[in-house]
Image: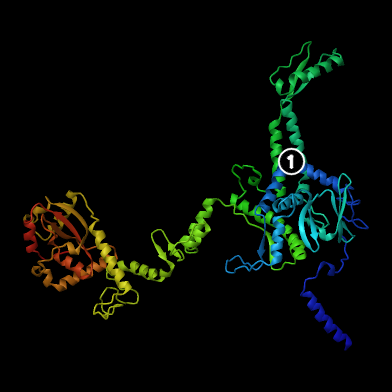
Amino acid sequence: MAFRDWFRRGGGEIEEAATKALTPGQVPERAGYSYGIPRGGLNEVNSSMGGATGTDRRSQLEQLYESYLSCPWAWACVNAIARTITAGGLVMDWNSDTGEGDEKPPDKPENVLALERLISWCNARQNIRQLMRNVVIDMLVFGDAFIEVTWWGELPVALYNLDNPTTTPLADEHGNITGYVQVTESGQRAEFEPRDVIHLSLDAPRSGVFGVSPTQAASLPITAWLFAAACGKEMARKGLPPNVHVDFPAGMQPGEMNRWRAQYQAQNVGPRNIGVPVMTKGGARIAELQAGKLPDVLAFLDQKRDEIIATYGVPPSKASIIESGNLGGGTGEEQDISYKVDLCAPIGELILEAFNFSVSSQGFGIENWRAKFREVDYRASTVVETIRDMRLRNGAWVLNRYKAEIGEPSVDGGDDAVLVDRQNLVLWSDMSAMSKAMIASKGAPAVAAGETPPGGEPMAPGAPDAPGGQDGEDGKPQESLLATQIARYRARVAEALAVTPITEASGGTAADVYDQLSVNFPASAIAWVKPAKWSGPRKVLVKDVDTSGRDSWDASHQPGEVAVFTSKLRKRQRKDRELKPVVLVKRPGAGKLLIADGHHRFLAYEKDGQAYVWAYIGTVGSEHGKWDELALSQKRDKAA
């Protein structure tokens, strides 16, 4: 029973402890050992890169430093990464900020303001960008970086870079850090408590105290590049001399041979002696074995250069290498994204995690705020402006937000979102009305052709049971938005037809009109057709046709015949065809066109509600003529 109670209490305590973060002093000791730490722990005497090599750590770090300074590609890659990460400087950011802009950050507490003061003045010689840049460079060259933290009581008041080759962490056999010690080349010695130093390490395959840098991983191509560069330097210094073989006479003494060799070096080797011939006497023979191979050296240098930048993970453009073709390398944007996300961001996060824990949390006791590297927009100005314009046009931004983004004052009405396409500008608040208007405009041609809308509702203004067809308070019909749109559409069609003539050659059209009329009229009655000037067939507005004598037309008293033509018209228009053209005459001084033939077809178009009639137009030279007699003696057409 007592055990059960103890277990229950212990379980509760364990659960409570598991929900709280433990401080470093509360973490239980580990049982395993760290790679690279000898028996008895690590100190400044026995620190080494590996027990197998026996090379002291300081000597190897000095070699890495010399490689970084001597190889321009190592220098370019390391500095490109360091500058990219630290370009925006270090700023404080609210942890609860989602980046969506929907939450306003609270006022900064006093401890956050105190840390910002430390960031703005970290020491008397460096600013925070320089300090963090040196941290990144140390990590990329040596694999580790050390930041010294100076305390005033319980608050950090200054930050400094510690020289990496002369600084060594002190650790027990399990890798637990007990302190740091710095011993300079002059024998100066300084000791630090664990809280006095922020130790940052890159990833290491065996998880030791020290990290592995890309400069160390690229030691082989860097060394090969340095040897090749030295070879090319000597070749250029000597003027690219060929390799020659000299066959001296058998009786020549060694002293004379050495003297000739010295003369050859002085007179034929070096930039000043390029082009000087080799002269001999006494029977000596010279043969060229191999010309200078500077192109091979340059190609080898390029190969090693590519291996070096690949080890660092830096795209060629970031190291000032101009590529031609770039086959298989992806676009420049893809390389830039990979460079920032896969290379710079992880290194930056390693630094920020250590800084936020050691300085922000442990030093200033800050919660819900964190230090971060400010992002820098590297995009081209044209790309940025294109994105801003797109957001404004699709309504994601309002005009005043756009103007605030570029530092311009707001304007009245600039808080209303709009949609801009190639032809229209519409407020998003009017989008419902715009949608209905678009539907009406799309359906207008079908309604004009006599089609019934989906659902069967009338769409013409004033039609029975049409939406808004009932009388309003003022006694006038209430036109719906749909009916109004159709009426306006028909008006626009009529205006377009009035200014869009379709003309053909006069001779061909006259012959077509004559052949059409000759079926129902004698030659004497249609002789006037050939001299007239004709156009069409085309659409002619109904309102432009003279209907003043409609009561005298035979067609006006034959509704059955007109109905037959109306039915034919609808069937043909479904197939994008028209009835046989009406023959119209344009007379001088007359405002409207006279129907010479086709009264039934004209009435069929009119009855069907069409705004136009399909017709030929003939221009004659006098107001009266045979066309008047043809109109008065109009007979029923035999064919449609």
- Please say if 232 is above or below 14: above
Judge left or right: residue 187 versus residue 161: right
Name the residue nearer the viewer: 619 or 51: 51
Question: What colouring method underlies this structural image?
Answer: rainbow
Judge left or right: residue 87 versus residue 479: right
Judge left or right: residue 135 versus residue 36: left
Horizontal and vertical percent position of residue 307: 71, 44
Which residue is most to the top? 282
Res 202 visible: no
The residue drawn where x is 18% and y is 64% is: 543
Q: What residue did someone put label 1 on?
A: 71
Name the residue nearer the viewer: 551 or 168: 168
The residue drawn where x is 81% and y is 77% is: 14
Horizontal and vertical percent position of residue 505: 20, 49
* Corner quadrant of residue 573: bottom left
Q: Residues within 10 Å of mark 1 (few under 14, many from 20)?
A: some
Amino acid type, mark 1: Cys
Judge left or right: residue 522 versus residue 27: left
Which residue is most to the bottom? 1
Res 39 visible: yes
- Please say if 554 is above or below 141: below
Q: What is the total number of numbered labels drawn onto the structure image?
A: 1
Horizontal and vertical percent position of residue 463: 26, 76
Horizontal and vertical percent position of residue 331: 59, 50
